[in-house]
């Protein structure tokens, strides 16, 4: 179950397992159950004889005295009446030849291991997000042999992403946001280019003038501006792809403006126009040198000023922002590929002398509303800060490598991305159990990289005025956390938060500010020795 932020709850969608009663053998009234097949399944004719190894769950006596064979799902007849009309008597067992994989279409006509029996024929059962192509299941969103349609193979080494073959030889990332997006107060570290990644000739912070050619992607120290996320992102993606035997060239530019809220960065503002100018120039340069360029993503680092301004429409702003970027970029490049937005949660609100902020919750809400276009990379509380708001050079590069992981997941592997966040939350008396979506299990409480703020960052609240205290927080499974309260809560408006309540006035980061200790066990190697675990997002969820 996907949980929404406290501003807008996302209703849970439950899909029940439908079962079709199987008539009993003889005159008895007992029955067994046969699961329906997926609507995307296909069947092939000609069942294979003699194959075995098919198992089905459930065993025991039926109400008529018949017994079920746990290895085949057959119902053995113990009465003198034989089998019902729609069943076959196969070796003293009543079977349904329409869906029994051991007797598919007739007695002892077994399907091969892993193949289902569908309407009396052996066939493949595909998952809901797959399609049967040439007797095999394919994900048309990401299968290079069946991209967008069965048999539509992408030529050469082209990727299939969003159901489209990606023919770009230069993959462009447009970086936007506030001062964090342009490396303010961060020392430039990545001063050499180890691969073939690119920037526009003035530098990552290219502005809008003099954009005549590409140059090797490096970070330049220009006054107070240094390292951005660009090099961490591009260089890790390229390194990991080369390790898989694939080339992947990324070009990047940043057009953010320090201290600017959404209203000063949205479509129609000088900043947005600068970004489009960079895209247009990069497209022309790539074409002139015989390359094909596609903007693969907008990487956003933003939210602080909208927090200060108390912007309660920020989730809607993010949705409009992504849509505007995609529409205008497509008009410039002519590409068919969508342009998703990757963003990290704001984590520095305590430096503004407040203890909580709606902005990280609004960022989650936008991702929940468009899970195919907006992706939360993660929070930033585990990173070192150079001041109240800004990151160190190492932190910018470290954050860039986190963006690289999500970039690869979504834009190379063609798979959905969900950060470490609650999947379901239940309460029984004084015990709250949270099941998390964990990118790389198992969960870990890490008090070495992040100082424990108390209860590993979890806080329970209600409107009683005296919410019961948390007495223990424990890992009870690879994806599960159990929080025990002193008493069963009696107030309404019950909420469980994580890394959401901080101490007003504290600087953000791993030892102060709003933070938590929950992470996964992601083994992705960093180019610079940074641990690339996925940390729990800031959340504040209702407890039912």
Image (spheres, rainbow, N blue to C red):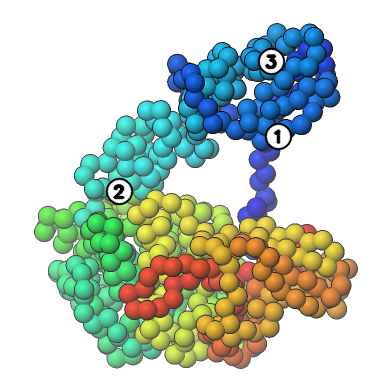
User: Is disc 2 surrounded by few (<14), some (14 to 19) or many (20+) residues within 10 Å?
Assistant: many
Residue 139: x percent and y percent?
42, 40
Secondary structure beneath label 1: loop
> Can the viewer see residue 355 in this picture?
no
Residue drawn 70% across and 8% down?
85
Disc 1 from disc 2: Cα separation = 43 Å
Q: Which mark is residue 92?
A: 3
Indicate which disc, 3 or 2, sits on the residue closer to the N terminus: 3
Q: Dot 2: what SS?
A: strand
Q: Where is residue 443 shown, x and y percent of the image?
A: 58, 67
- Label 2 sits on residue: 159
- Figure check: 404 above or below 139: below
Tell me: residue 265, above or below residue 78: below
Label annotation for residue 231: none
Image quadrant assignment for residue 99? top right
Q: Which numbered disc, 1 or 3, marks the residue closer to the eye?
A: 3
Q: Quadrant of the C terminus?
A: bottom right
């Amino acid at each position: 179950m996907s949980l929404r932020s406290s501003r807008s709850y996302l209703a849970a969608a439950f899909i029940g397992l439908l079962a079709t009663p199987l008539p009993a053998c003889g005159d008895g009234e007992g029955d067994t159950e046969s699961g329906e097949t997926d609507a995307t399944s296909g069947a092939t004719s000609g069942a294979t004889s003699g194959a075995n190894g098919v198992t089905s769950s459930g065993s025991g006596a039926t109400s008529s005295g018949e017994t079920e064979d746990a290895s085949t799902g057959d119902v053995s007849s113990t009465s003198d009446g034989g089998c019902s009309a729609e069943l076959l008597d196969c070796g003293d067992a009543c079977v349904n030849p329409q869906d029994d994989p051991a007797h598919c279409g007739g007695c002892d006509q077994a399907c091969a291991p892993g193949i289902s029996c569908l309407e009396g024929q052996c066939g493949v059962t595909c998952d809901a997000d797959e399609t049967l192509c040439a007797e095999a299941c394919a994900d048309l969103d990401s299968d290079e042999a069946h991209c967008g349609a069965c048999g539509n193979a992408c030529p050469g080494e082209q990727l299939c992403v969003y159901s489209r073959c990606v023919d770009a030889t230069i993959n462009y990332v447009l970086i936007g946001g506030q001062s964090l997006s342009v490396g303010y107060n961060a020392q430039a570290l990545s001063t050499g280019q180890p691969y073939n990644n690119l920037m526009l000739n003035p530098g990552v912070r290219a502005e809008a003038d003099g954009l005549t050619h590409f140059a090797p992607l490096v970070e330049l120290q220009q006054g107070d501006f240094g390292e951005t996320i660009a090099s961490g992102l591009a260089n890790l993606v390229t390194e990991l792809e080369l390790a898989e035997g694939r080339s992947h060239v990324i070009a990047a530019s940043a057009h953010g403006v320090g201290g600017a809220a959404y209203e000063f960065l949205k479509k129609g503002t000088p900043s947005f126009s600068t970004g489009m100018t960079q895209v247009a120039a990069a497209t022309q340069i790539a074409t002139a040198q015989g390359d094909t360029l596609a903007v693969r993503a907008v990487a956003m680092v933003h939210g602080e000023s909208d927090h200060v301004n108390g912007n309660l429409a920020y989730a809607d702003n993010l949705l409009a922002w992504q849509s505007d970027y995609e529409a205008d970029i497509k008009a410039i490049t002519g590409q068919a590929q969508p342009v998703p937005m990757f963003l990290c949660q704001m984590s520095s609100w305590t430096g503004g002398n407040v203890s909580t902020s709606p902005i990280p919750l609004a960022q989650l809400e936008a991702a929940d509303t468009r899970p195919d276009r907006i992706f939360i990379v993660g929070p930033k509380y585990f990173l070192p800060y150079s001041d109240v708001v800004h990151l160190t050079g190492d932190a910018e590069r470290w954050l860039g490598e986190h963006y690289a992981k999500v970039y690869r997941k979504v834009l190379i592997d063609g798979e959905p991305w969900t950060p470490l966040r609650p999947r379901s939350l239940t309460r029984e008396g004084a015990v709250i159990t949270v099941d998390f979506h964990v990118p790389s299990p198992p969960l870990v409480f890490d008090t070495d990289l992040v100082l424990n703020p108390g209860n590993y960052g979890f806080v329970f609240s209600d409107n009683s005025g005296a919410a019961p205290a948390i007495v223990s927080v424990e890992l009870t499974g690879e994806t599960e956390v159990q929080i025990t309260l002193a008493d069963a809560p009696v107030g309404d408006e019950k909420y469980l938060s994580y890394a959401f309540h901080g101490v007003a006035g504290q600087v953000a980061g791993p030892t102060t500010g709003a933070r938590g200790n929950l992470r996964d066990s992601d083994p992705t190697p960093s180019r610079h020795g940074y641990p690339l675990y996925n940390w729990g997002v800031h959340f504040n969820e209702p407890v039912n």
